[in-house]
Image (spheres, rainbow, N blue to C red):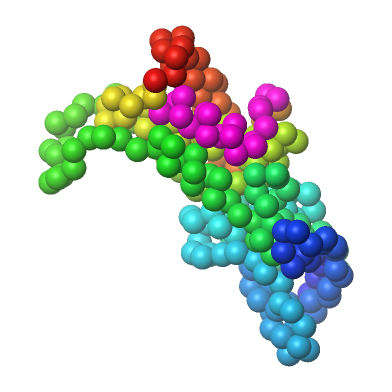
Amino acid sequence: MTIRLRVWRQRREERRGRLVDYEVPDVSPDMSFLEMLDVLNDSLERRDEEPIAFEHDCREGICGSCGFMIDGRAHGPLPGVTVCQLHLRHFSDGDTLVVEPWRARAFPVIKDLVVDRSAFDRIIQSGGYVSVNTGSAPEANAVPVGKEAAETALDAAACIGCGACVAACKNASAMLFTGAKLTHLGRLPQGQPERRRRARAMVRAMDAEGFGNCTNEAECEAECPKGISFDTIARLNREFLAAEFRDPAGG
């Protein structure tokens, strides 16, 4: 099959970018999208042209680094799938696909399809930890955790920080990501000592990075490859408001 691509090319953040047309012939429907880009880059290098920069690591849908937009959809048209797990059999021979990086002020373009997502790291660093002493693993039943709380925490922990929620939101909101991290730690006993301080610190860090606010349209949940629930945003708001009311000075 043959796939035609319109790929965003941009040498660095301060340079203007543009869409460039490419044709990738004789690719297998069993190839992943990233494997197709590998084939294209190989042909570009043989012609002494600059290969397309894109980010990836595990290629198993668990690291979150491979994301970009395909025809205006974060990670492409399939639900619950990252770009590295998206296969060409879901497209038709001769399709023309527009490929662009995440679009958000907080995610500046490094090159082509690669964006700087370190804003997420700074949000986590602001408060995403617990102060419980570490040591040998405790006995499994030493710290009882309710089934509902455990399942909610583990569902939120599935977030891979890919940034699809930000890219899908018209306000480039990071509230689904931040809410997932707060839910993961805040629903477990080990996360209680810093619970209020964590909520305040992470929300303030999120705002400082330039992410927008939620408009309750749930594009983030629809595009999230791990299906993180929109409920985590409501939980984030409750945690932040509780922290502000209990300690207005923000200590």
185 or 16, which is in the foreground? 16
Q: Is residue 214 magenta?
A: yes
Residue under the image location 60 percent in, 42 percent down: 224
Q: Which one is nearer the viewer's eye here, 2 or 162?
A: 162
Q: Is residue 170 left or right of residue 236?
A: right
Q: Quadrant of the C terminus?
A: top left
The residue at 73%/48% (across/down) is 103
Vertical comparison of 207 with 34: above or below? above
Q: Quadrant of residue 105?
A: top right
Q: Position of residue 139 (x, y in %)?
A: 13, 38
The residue drawn where x is 49% and y is 39% is: 123
Q: Which residues are magenta?
A: 198-216
Q: Is residue 17 above or below residue 105?
A: below
Observer-nearest residue: 73 or 115? 115
Quarter of the image holding residue 223? Answer: top right
Q: Tell me what residue is drawn at x 49 percent, y 56 percent.
A: 63
